[in-house]
Image (cartoon, rainbow, N blue to C red):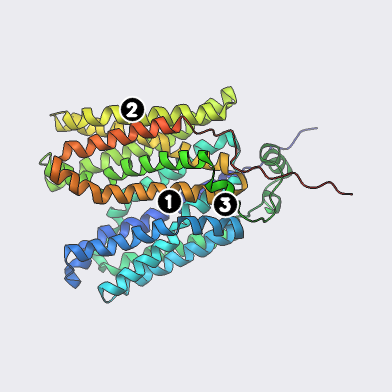
């Protein structure tokens, strides 16, 4: 008698989540690409442009924890559907803005919605992905985000050229609404509720993850008093500062410090990001392979993330001092690749130690990461003005080294909050 093979509903859910990560970066990078056209039409000053862009970053940081908490309370099926609908609506409303105030409000409310995306996406995988698949899952989802960021400018430029700057906002809003409809139709918070998952897949998930949770109050006291929570969040602060240096300032560095033309800058600024896509995938894959071979989750998450941090810390100073610009770009690509070995493992640890409250745990971690990115954006201008470009990358190297040290104190095998066993039935 043959035994049925487990279905792979969890993998379909994973790829839907990868698409979500791409959609977040479609909508996030969209305004940066469209801003020159917007600025030309409205006559915004560069300070006003900064205010509009900062409105998103501010609300995105502020609403990480509320977004994760709501996902843990209502479940990721309802919550992700609602927030993607929300931010898609404000993506469209951005195209209808008539003043700086209306655009700031739209971008602030857009950021409120996107703030819940990554914590709730992490929560959505917590009841589906096996521990041995989580590193790969987090790596490939973040690779989707980086890929979305890389291809958005091309699509937006095409639409603006043919239809004007407002059209991309409407197009990407429709993409988001379509994703929300598919998600609500297909995803279920509990594998036992999914009609397409067979008993073998459900039993495999149940054996690895335990019984499905019932709705409970979020144990904020345990989460916020956990040294491990703050160790993980501190590592993500270091990661957020370091990676965002390449997202926000690297093109300007190539222009100001390396003297590259606009065409050269456009090409070479994208190469480290492309290397980051490979790092996202490789970091999760390496971690999961180590778990499969050794069964040691703590060791697997730690060795890959710490190695990534330390390679970046070593390579960044060498890259900035290298006189040949092409060798320097290759070294910076290695630095970003190494930093991206961290991200899949950090989010996998949020799943590992967060358990049924992974949304809330990951929201705390991501809040600190975005604070790091916000500080970097402001601080780098002052560092460059006072000490030069080299110093700005030395700071990145120092924070990468600190992140590697801090990750040594993270134990992916120990959950922050272990729910008490159910009372025996009398």
Residue 78, image x, y percentages: 58, 62
Residue on which disc 3 sits: 220
Residue 108, image x, y percentages: 36, 65
Measured Cα–Cα span from mark 1 to mark 3? 15 Å
In the image, residue 307 above or below residue 174: above
Circles 3 and 2 in contact, beta carbons < 8 Å: no
Residue at the image point whose x is 62% and y is 47% from the top? 356
Residue at the image point whose x is 26% and y is 67% from the top? 165
Residue 88, image x, y percentages: 42, 65
Q: Tag 2 or tag 3, which sits nearer the N-term?
A: 3
Element carrying mark 3: helix
Residue on which disc 1 sits: 367
Farthest-out residue, top = 294
How packed is label 3: few (under 14 Cα within 10 Å), some, or many (20 or more)? some
Farthest-out residue, bottom = 98
Measured Cα–Cα span from mark 3 to mark 2? 35 Å
Residue on which disc 2 sits: 311
Residue 83, image x, y percentages: 49, 63
Q: Of 261 and 387, which appears nearest the observer?
A: 387
Instruction: Note whether residue 266 is visible.
Output: no
Element carrying mark 2: helix
Q: Left or right of 223: which side holds 418?
A: right
């Amino acid at each position: 008698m043959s035994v049925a093979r487990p279905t792979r509903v969890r993998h379909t859910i994973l790829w839907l989540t990868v698409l979500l990560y791409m959609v977040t970066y479609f909508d996030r990078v969209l305004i940066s690409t469209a801003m020159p056209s917007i600025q030309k039409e409205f006559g915004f000053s560069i300070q006003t442009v900064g205010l509009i862009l900062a409105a998103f970053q501010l609300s995105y940081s502020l609403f990480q924890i509320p977004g994760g908490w709501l996902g843990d309370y209502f479940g990721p099926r309802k919550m992700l559907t609602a927030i993607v609908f929300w931010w898609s609506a404000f993506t469209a409303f951005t195209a209808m803005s008539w003043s700086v105030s209306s655009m700031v409000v739209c971008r602030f409310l857009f950021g409120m919605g996107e703030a819940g995306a990554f914590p709730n996406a992490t929560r959505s995988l917590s009841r589906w992905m096996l521990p041995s698949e989580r590193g790969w899952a987090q790596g490939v989802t973040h690779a989707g985000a980086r890929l979305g960021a890389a291809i958005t400018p091309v699509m937006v430029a095409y639409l603006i050229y043919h239809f004007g700057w407002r059209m991309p906002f409407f197009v990407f809003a429709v993409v988001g609404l379509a994703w929300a409809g598919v998600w609500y139709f297909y995803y279920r918070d509990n594998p036992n509720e999914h009609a397409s998952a067979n008993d073998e897949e459900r039993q495999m998930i149940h054996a690895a993850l335990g019984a499905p949770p019932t709705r409970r109050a979020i144990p904020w006291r345990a989460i916020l008093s956990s040294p491990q929570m703050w160790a993980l969040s501190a590592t993500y602060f270091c990661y957020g500062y370091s990676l965002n240096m390449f997202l926000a300032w690297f093109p300007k560095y190539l222009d100001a410090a390396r003297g590259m033309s606009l065409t050269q800058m456009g090409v070479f600024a994208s190469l480290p990001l492309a290397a980051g896509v490979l790092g996202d995938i490789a970091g999760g894959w390496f971690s999961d392979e180590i778990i499969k071979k050794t069964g040691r989750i703590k060791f697997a998450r730690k060795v890959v993330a710490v190695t990534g941090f330390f390679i970046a810390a070593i390579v960044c100073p060498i890259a900035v001092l290298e006189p040949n610009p092409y060798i320097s770009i290759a070294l910076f690509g290695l630095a970003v690749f190494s930093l991206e070995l961290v991200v899949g493992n950090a989010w996998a640890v949020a799943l590992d130690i967060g358990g049924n409250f992974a949304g809330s745990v990951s929201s705390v971690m991501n809040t600190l990461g975005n604070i790091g990115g916000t500080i970097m954006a402001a601080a780098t201008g002052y560092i460059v003005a006072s000490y030069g470009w080299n110093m700005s990358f030395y700071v990145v190297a120092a924070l990468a080294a600190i992140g590697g040290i801090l990750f040594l104190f993270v134990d992916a095998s120990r959950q922050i909050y272990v729910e008490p066993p159910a009372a025996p039935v009398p």
